Each structure stands twice: as structure tokens, then as C-alpha cells.
Amino acid sequence: MNYLLGIDIGTSGTKTVLFDEAGHGVASYTGEYPMAQPKNGWAEQDPADWWKAVVDGIRAVLAKSGIDAGEIRGIGLSGQMHSLVLLDEKGEVLRPSILWCDQRTAVECEEIHALMGGKERYIEITANPALTGFTAGKILWVRKHEPEIYAKARHILLAKDYIRYKLCNVFATEVSDASGMGLLDVPNRCWSQEVLEKLDIDPAMLAKVYESPEVTGTITAEAAALTGLKEGTIVVGGAGDNAAAAVGTGVVEDGRAFATIGTSGVVFAHTDKLSIDPKGRVHTFCCAVPGAWHVMGVTLAAGQSLKWYRDNFCDADKVEAEKQGVDPYDLMTAEAAKTPIGSNRLIYLPYLMGERTPHLDPDCRGAFVGLSGMHTRYDLVRAVMEGVTFSLRDCAEILRGMGVQSDVILACGGGGSSAFWRQMMADILGCPVATTISKEGPALGVAILAGVGAGLYPSVPEACRQIVGVNASQDPVAEHVAEYDKFYEIYRGLYPALKDSWKALAEL
């Protein structure tokens, strides 16, 4: 029997899933770890926590499944994008990883545009502006603020590529994750010598770039002893989390799209033709299908907004959920569903960590607008869900303006598991919303890539046609669409009305 292993290094935890050749999950394990926020707008993690979660996960799925590790034909890695890992000459981590949602590098991003002779030239090469979440600004920040650490740095890696190094003792990355560093020539799928020269970054510090299904290394004897894997098992390039989710949901051909409500929110569409937004409001990256790209809009605090609200204001729901043996989110959303569209004239702006699409503003912050004495906590729950979905519509509107369309949107992430939230997405986005039969997303996606690399499937699209199934869609309700449109128009006007106040607050 042939098996494939998919490992997804996320922000809140790492999920390890063992699949059979048909894409059925055999065993899974999730290891959680903390995120540190030492200052307002900062976000860091210890890469050692990722590695422990990976080792624990591999050992757990091997034990649960009872299979011979030699039956695993390949391993794929997915991970949170943009997170900077710096290693010294001995391969030791020099400082905590600076994460994708960290906002400290606004000054460095402006410096990047200046060094490149303008934002326009930088976008021509990297297909994106310099953004606070991206890796390039983090590199410059460490060089400026922690010169003693940067002087020791010999290797620059991303989260999943650090795990690759620990498994295979190689320094490698692949095009989808590398696209989010701000150093890749995205049209030509290679490191940009012009960008590296102008930013004064030594190319020797960067990993070799592969296509996502290519074999990048094999499991070392040391990693095999720690994990229980068989020495010599192949590890393919894998993909950044969203590119991996695209493979896991079958969004690997034109006309396919998905929307994710995880910690962040994403609207993602595949394109065989390079398409770049000259304003830089959405990202164009190389995708996990060789020779193709994807366009995506990102909102930084999607599921994080609802988690923040739950953790701070819904203790009663958590207690009641424990009594009933159910998920507190199910209780919260069931009550929120009783609130009318528009949350009794209450609007939430989901900018807890600043925002990317469409505002590119690290200073904006979350807000409830229209709050009154009549509102209950469930009005606020619904307002949070509606505000997050409005932010996804912001993303979708830009993609439509670029000519990137989809007949059906596949819902992913924790938010996608809620039928109530999926119907809200269909009504607000004005498009049928479906789910895939498998809920493994990124882990399944990189397992499929591993299967292609191992020769089990002829190509990524063909593998997805064989493996990925889709459930019936939820269609927009016409009267709901019309009602949501009224509140979306008000939502769109709130950012320009408040942006100067947010900037002033940031400068205090």
C-alpha cells in the first residue's frame, strides 16, 4: 500500500496527516503552540515549537495507523507564509521567527520602494508592493535594529523550509512560498538579482528554489531516528499555506477559486496567465502548479476576529458549551443567526492587525460602528462575522475587476465549516459557495504534491481530478443579497472616514 504524508505548519499549530493513495485521511495529529506579541503589532514564534510539533505529529500518525514507515512514498510540507527564520553558520536559530501578521516594518517597506527607484518597478519584478507582512522588510528590520544578530546570519528560511532543513539537512524552498518574500522575480520564477543587489542581500543566504512537486531532499538518518520515518523518504517542495489549500480543494485550473476563513481570510483564484494589480492591492504569486500563478486578496484578522471576541467576551458560552459537549463557536453562531442581517445596524471593521487588501495600511485597527445600548453580545458576534465577510468581498471585487472570475467559490478554514457562515458568504459575495468532501485542505494539498513528485500521479491537475470531491453548493438568496448590499456600501465608506484617526493614534 502506498501512503503520503502532509504536514501543515500553521500559526496556531502544526497538523500532520497521513493519507492513502486515494487521498483518504488515515491518521492525523495537531500540535499547538503559542504566539508571542512582545509589542503592539508584533508577532513572533519559536521555530523549536514547530519542530517539536512536527516530530510529535509524525510519531503520532505512525503509531495511530500502525503502518510501516517504508510505505510512505513521499512527504509534502505546507506552512504559514512570510515568516522569517534566521540561522547561523551551524544551522542554529538566531532569534524568534517574525510572523506574517507582524506589522513592525512599515518604515522598511518604504525604504524598499525607494531603493528600487519606486513602487512601480518593484511591483513589475515581484508582482507585489513591499508589505509589512512580507519577508523582505523583516530582513531589513533585523539588519537595522539587531545588527549583531544579522551579522551572524548565514541562512534565510521560511517556516516550512526550516522544517525541511531539520528533516533533510538541505536549504530549499519552492516558488509559491518564495513569492511571498518580496525577493522573487515572480514572472520568471527565480530570485531577482536586481532586487537582491539594490537591497544588499547576499543571494548565498537564500535557499534554492524549486517547483512545488519537485523533490527537494530526503529524510536523513538523524530525522528518521527522531520521527520514526524511513531514511531516504522523499520530501517535495510543497507550498505556502494558501497555495497548498488550492491543491487540496482542486483550485488548480482556470475558473476555480476558494475563500478561506482561518486566522486570516483569503480569496484565492487560479490563473494560467500572469495577472498583476498595478496598485498592489492583491497578491500575485507563483502557484503550486508549475508554470501557473494565483491571485489572492488577504484580510489579516478573519477567524482571529471571532476568536478574539470569543476569548474576551463569551465566557458564558464556553462554560455552556463544555456542559453540552459542543464547540462554543456553534453556540455563538446559532444565537447570532437569530439576529437580522446588518446586526441591528451594527458594523464591525476587522482590522485587529492592520490590513492588506484593499487598504495596505498597518495602522488601521478594529472597530464597531453603530454600537448602542440595545445590542447584545450575539449582535456583536454576527457583526464580526459580517464584517469579516465584507472584507472578503473587498478582495473578490478587485479580482473581478482584473478579469479573474469563478462560477463557484469553495469555502475553507474553520469559518467554512459553518453552514450559517457559508450562506452569509454566498449572499455577500453573490456567488454559490461549496465545500470539498475532504476537510484537510493544505495537508491534503501537499500530500498530493508529494504523490506527483513520487510518480503516483502524472500532474497536479490530474491528481486533483482523481482525489478532490466537492459537496453541493449553497446559492445566494436574492433578498439577502439586496439587504447585505446596503450594509456593504456603508462598510466601504468607514475606512476612508477613519484612516486619519488611526494614523494619529499610531503616532501617539
Image (tube, rainbow, N blue to C red):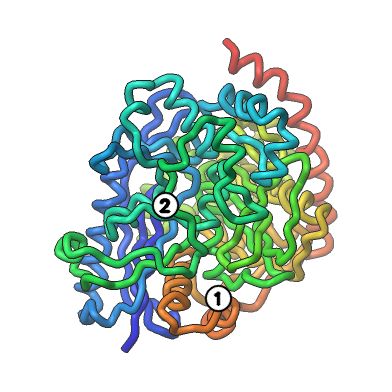
Q: Which amino acid does the dot numbered 2 rest on?
A: Gly
Per the rendering, the mark at residue 460 is 1
Q: Position of residue 444 (x, y in %)?
A: 45, 70
- Quick check: 445 above or below 189? below
> What distance separates the C-alpha of mark 1 from that of mark 2?
23 Å
Q: Is residue 331 left or right of residue 382?
A: left
Q: Position of residue 249 (x, y in %)?
A: 57, 70
Q: Position of residue 419 (x, y in %)?
A: 59, 65
Instruction: Name which quarter of the figure residue 375 lies in.
Output: top right
- Quick check: 392 above or below 156? below
Q: Earlier in the sequence, mark 1 or mark 2?
A: 2
Q: Residue furthest top?
A: 508
Q: 349 or 409: which is nearer to us?
A: 409
Q: How many marks?
A: 2
Q: Quadrant of the N terminus?
A: bottom left
- Quick check: 112 above or below 250? above
Res 379 visible: yes
Q: 85 or 429: which is nearer to us?
A: 85
